[in-house]
Image (tube, rainbow, N blue to C red):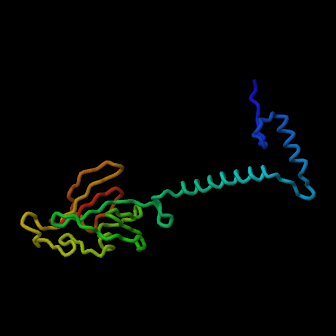
């Protein structure tokens, strides 16, 4: 048994299923109203409604395709972005860091310790602190220099540790020798301490 093509005709009382011959008659009737010479044809309200529905679905498909082409983590002007996490602890307490607006030459922004930067751009830890206007060297963070005393329970020196946090997986923090020159990578978790 061959499958049959069906169409539905909307009527005032509901709808009715049309067989193939009824579809051909309707199509012939539509085409008979079309005049090649005058390039005019008549359109019913149902036809206009169908065209509007097709345009709405088609338009939403185009918008979806464009939004899928540029995911949220992509800055169209600068390319894909990466994210790292930065924490500063002084004398055992976390310090609130100022936000960085993305309107700067190197394209970094920061809010609540989340640093966003262009992927593969070579942004360093020193760049981030420079954008925040915070002094940061291997011997000083803010106004705290090595051998200034927080209290007697700490070593009283600047140190930097790094781990990774990507998609829920965490790598433990490890001390590192790089300070300002460390190039941030996506998923970095960096802790700068003075204690």
Above or below: residue 150 compared with residue 32: below
Q: Position of residue 33 (x, y in %)?
A: 90, 50
Count the numbered circles shown: 0
The foreground one among 72 and 164 is: 72
Who's the residue at 10% across and 64% down the image? 154
- Residue that sits furthest to the left in the current view: 152
Looking at the rendered image, the quarter that the C terminus falls into is: bottom left
- Residue that sits furthest to the front in the current view: 13
Who's the residue at 86% across and 54% down the image? 42
Looking at the rendered image, the quarter that the N terminus falls into is: top right
Q: Is residue 58 left or right of residue 122?
A: right
The foreground one among 11 and 26 is: 11
Which image quadrant is residue 87 in?
bottom left
Q: Is residue 143 left or right of residue 149?
A: right
Q: Position of residue 11 (x, y in %)?
A: 79, 42
Which image quadrant is residue 105 in?
bottom left
Q: Position of residue 144 (x, y in %)?
A: 17, 73
Q: Is residue 151 left or right of residue 18?
A: left
Who's the residue at 36% across and 57% down the image? 186
Who's the residue at 32% across and 67% down the image? 124
Q: Position of residue 34 (x, y in %)?
A: 89, 52
- Residue that sits furthest to the top in the current view: 1
């Amino acid at each position: 048994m061959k499958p049959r093509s069906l169409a539905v005709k909307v009527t005032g009382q509901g709808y009715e299923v049309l067989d193939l011959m009824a579809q051909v008659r309707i199509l012939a009737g539509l085409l008979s109203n079309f005049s090649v010479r005058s390039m005019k044809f008549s359109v019913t309200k149902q036809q206009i409604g169908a065209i509007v529905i097709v345009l709405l679905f088609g338009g939403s498909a185009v918008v979806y395709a464009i939004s899928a082409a540029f995911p949220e983590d992509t800055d169209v002007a600068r390319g894909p972005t990466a994210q790292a996490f930065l924490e500063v602890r002084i004398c055992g307490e976390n310090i609130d860091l100022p936000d960085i607006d993305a309107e700067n030459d190197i394209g970094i922004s920061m809010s609540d310790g989340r640093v966003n930067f262009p992927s593969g751009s070579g942004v360093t830890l020193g760049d981030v602190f420079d954008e925040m206007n915070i002094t940061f060297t291997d011997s000083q963070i803010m106004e705290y220099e090595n051998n200034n005393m927080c209290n007697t329970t700490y070593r009283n020196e600047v140190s930097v540790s790094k781990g990774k946090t990507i998609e829920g997986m965490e790598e433990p923090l490890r001390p590192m020798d790089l300070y300002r020159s460390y190039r941030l990578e996506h998923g970095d978790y960096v802790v700068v301490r003075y204690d």
